[in-house]
């Protein structure tokens, strides 16, 4: 597995964990009534959900940014 693929996998795992965490927070707030549903609350949770889905999708722009200047190693060239 190439380093770029491993990085993308780690990003996806972070995305899944983030989504689970946000959904857990939203569920707890809805059940316990601990958080008033304001516009700011809705915007923050929506932004976190979108970032989580982007990470699960693989965050292609982030991965390309991280590996844009990397020269290919012989092991990476064999994988093509």
Image (cartoon, rainbow, N blue to C red):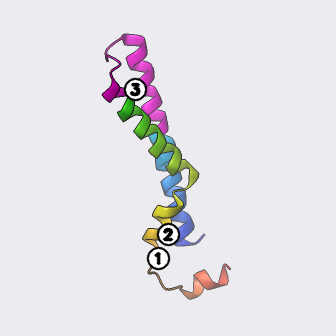
* Image location (x, y in percent) of residue 67: 47, 74
Q: Is residue 73 above or below residue 6?
A: below
Q: Which residues are magenta?
A: 19-41
Write the residue at 51% across / 57% down. 59
Find residue 78 and report its horizontal and vertical position in percent: 66, 84
Instruction: Mark 1 and mark 3 in contact? Answer it, CB < 8 Å.
Output: no
Magenta-span inclusion, residue 31 = yes
- Earlier along the polypeptide chain: callout 1 or callout 3? 3
Q: Tag 1, which secondary structure?
A: loop
Q: Main secondary structure of the magenta part?
A: helix
Tell us which disc is closer to us: 1 or 3.
1
x 53%, y 85%: residue: 72
Among the two numbered marks 2 and 3 on one chain, the one whose residue lies closer to the N terminus: 3
What is the C-alpha distance between the residues marked 1 and 3?
36 Å
Q: Decide: few, some or many residues near mark 1? Use Cα within 10 Å; few <14, some 14-19, many ≥20.
A: few
Q: Which residue is mark 1?
A: 68
38 left or right, relative to 53? left
Q: Quadrant of the C terminus?
A: bottom right
Label 3 belongs to which residue?
25
Q: Residue at x 59, y 83 (%)?
A: 75
Q: Are marks 2 and 1 in contact (CB under 8 Å)?
A: yes
Q: Nearer the viewer, mark 2 or mark 3?
A: 2
Q: Which residue carries the number 2 mark? A: 64
């Amino acid at each position: 597995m190439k380093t770029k693929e491993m990085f993308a996998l780690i990003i996806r795992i972070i995305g899944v964990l983030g989504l689970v965490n946000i959904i857990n927070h939203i569920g707890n707030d809805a059940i316990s009534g601990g958080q008033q549903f304001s516009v700011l609350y809705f915007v923050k949770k929506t932004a976190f959900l979108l970032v989580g889905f982007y990470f699960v999708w693989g965050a292609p722009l982030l991965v390309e940014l991280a590996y844009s200047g990397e020269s290919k190693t012989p092991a990476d060239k064999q994988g093509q």
